[in-house]
Structure formats: structure tokens, C-alpha cells
């Protein structure tokens, strides 16, 4: 029996959503209606993200990657959080709808190794950037995720494992419904409250470490 933490990247480990930040810089006008349509549920995340990167010519990839790395700010307490998980033998997986060119350098900067990373890749062989999803939806998912967090959880989790999901957005909600316990902020917090899913709010990773360290915290009633 293992405690598994499934942690989102954009808006969770990083303070801001990097895909939105990239679009504000490289395709501000054309991306706006696409972002709105995804927010309102008129377009799937998969479809919206693919359409947005199609707006950017492939020869701007290096500039996009550099910009993303320069503009990622990590939420406070993340290094200590990795350390705490490792000490307890809890398995941390970063499961991101974002891309290798900003997720990998940031995680590798803070971790000594024991973090699984799931993220996506941009194909630059065509005229415009083309999204390659590393983990598309499996038949058990209704589809449209892009990187499908429920599929990753189904692949990772063994019977008897405890699952903790950490996230901030609507893209984390399907995963949160599969969790024993959720640490939530922003939109995800409202969604898990509404559904009565066991959770605690967090602002920084210090809050999560404090709950893990406090044997009286509600978290410990839900995991084994
Ligand atoms: Zn899916």
C-alpha cells in the first residue's frame, strides 16, 4: 500500500498558468476567443490547446521555450514538499497538461530524482507548432482532456493505494473525483466543496507540508 500524490503543474507548482502566459505574449489577440471558449466549456481543453499552438510558427519554438523558462515562478514551499514526500516514502507524480520545455527544467531544478513527470511535447517539424499529447484519454474517459489525468491515475494506482490530488483548476476535477483526499485552490476548491470531496485548501506548499506533518489534520483520516 502506497500513498500516491498526483500534483498538477500550471497554477499549482507554478504560480501562473504558463500556456495562457505564452499566448498573451505570442498570440494575444487570436488566442483570446479560444481561451474564452475553453473556459466556458464550448471547446475541450485538448481542442483549445491544439488550436492555440497552431497560431505560433515553429521557428519561434526556441523563443517560446526561453520565455516560458524565464517566466515560471514556483509556489513557495515546493522544495520542502518534495523532501517531505521522499522522507515518508510517498510517491509524487507531477501530472501536467503543460509541456516538457518548461515543466522538466523546473522540476529537475528542485528534485534529486524521485519525481515521476507526465507532460506533453511540441512537434516543430511542420510550419506551426503541433501538440503531441503524451497520455491521451483511455476508453474509460469521456474524452477531450488532452493529457488525461484520470487515465494516468488508472495506470499508476494499485488496489489499496491512497491517492492525494493537488490542483487548482477544472482540468484537475476529474482526477479529484478519483482521489481519497484533495488539496485544492482556486476553481478546484469550489468544485470539491460543492461535491463534498474530502479536502483542505492551500495557498503555498507550506500549508500542504503542515497538514502532512500534523497527525491531527483531517487528511490522515482518509489515507492509509
Ligand atoms: Zn480523459
Image (cartoon, rainbow, N blue to C red):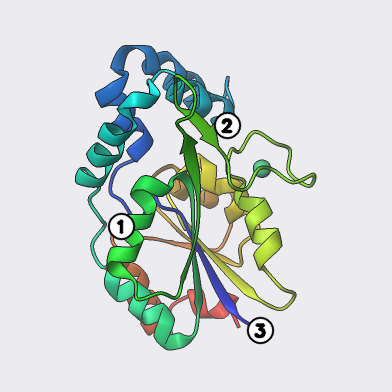
The residue singled out by tag 3 in the image is: 1
Label 2 sits on a secondary structure element that is: helix
Query: Looking at this rendering, what residue extends furthest in the left direction?
Result: 70
Left or right placement of residue 36 versus residue 222 in this view: left
Label 3 sits on a secondary structure element that is: loop
Label 1 sits on a secondary structure element that is: helix
Label 3 vs label 1, nearer the camera: 1
- Residue closest to the eye, 83 or 187: 83
Mark 3 crowdedness (10 Å alpha carbons): few <14, some 14-19, many ≥20:
few
Mark 1 crowdedness (10 Å alpha carbons): few <14, some 14-19, many ≥20:
some
Q: Which numbered tag is attached to residue 207?
A: none
Q: CA distance from mark 2 to mark 3?
A: 33 Å
Percent position of residue 204, x then y: 28, 61
Left or right placement of residue 11 versus residue 37 in this view: left
Q: Which numbered tag is attached to residue 106?
A: 1
Label 1 vs 2, first from the N-terminus:
2
Quadrant assignment for ligand 1 = top right
The quadrant holding residue 58 is top left
The residue singled out by tag 2 in the image is: 46
Percent position of residue 60, x then y: 31, 26
Q: Quadrant of the N terminus?
A: bottom right
- Residue closest to the eye, 224 or 79: 79
Kindly tell me whether residue 215 is visible in this rendering: no
Label 1 vs label 2, nearer the camera: 1
Label 2 vs 3, first from the N-terminus:
3
- Marks 3 and 1: CB-CB under 8 Å? no
Q: Quadrant of the C terminus?
A: bottom right
Residue at (57, 22) in percent of width and height: 43
Amino acid at each position: 500500500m502506497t500513498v500516491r500524490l498526483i500534483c498538477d503543474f500550471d497554477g499549482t507548482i507554478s504560480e501562473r498558468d504558463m500556456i495562457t502566459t505564452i499566448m498573451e505574449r505570442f498570440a494575444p489577440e487570436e488566442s483570446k476567443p479560444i481561451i474564452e471558449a475553453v473556459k466556458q466549456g464550448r471547446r475541450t481543453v485538448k481542442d483549445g490547446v491544439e488550436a492555440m499552438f497552431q497560431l505560433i510558427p515553429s521557428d519561434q519554438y526556441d523563443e517560446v521555450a526561453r520565455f516560458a523558462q524565464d517566466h515560471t515562478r514556483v509556489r513557495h514551499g515546493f522544495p520542502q514538499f518534495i523532501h517531505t514526500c521522499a522522507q515518508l516514502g510517498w510517491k509524487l507524480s507531477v501530472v501536467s497538461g503543460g509541456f516538457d520545455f518548461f515543466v522538466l527544467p523546473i522540476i529537475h531544478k528542485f528534485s534529486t530524482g524521485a519525481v515521476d513527470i507526465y507532460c506533453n511535447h511540441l512537434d516543430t517539424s511542420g510550419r506551426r507548432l503541433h501538440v503531441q499529447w503524451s497520455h491521451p484519454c483511455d476508453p474509460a474517459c469521456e474524452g477531450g482532456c488532452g493529457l488525461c489525468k484520470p487515465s494516468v491515475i488508472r495506470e499508476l494506482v494499485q488496489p489499496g493505494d491512497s491517492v492525494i490530488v493537488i490542483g487548482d483548476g477544472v482540468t484537475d476535477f476529474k482526477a479529484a473525483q478519483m482521489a481519497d483526499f484533495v488539496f485544492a485552490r482556486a476553481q478546484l476548491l469550489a468544485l470539491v466543496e460543492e461535491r463534498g470531496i474530502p479536502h483542505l485548501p492551500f495557498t503555498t506548499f507550506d500549508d500542504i507540508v503542515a497538514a502532512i506533518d500534523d497527525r491531527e489534520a483531517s487528511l490522515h483520516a482518509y489515507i492509509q
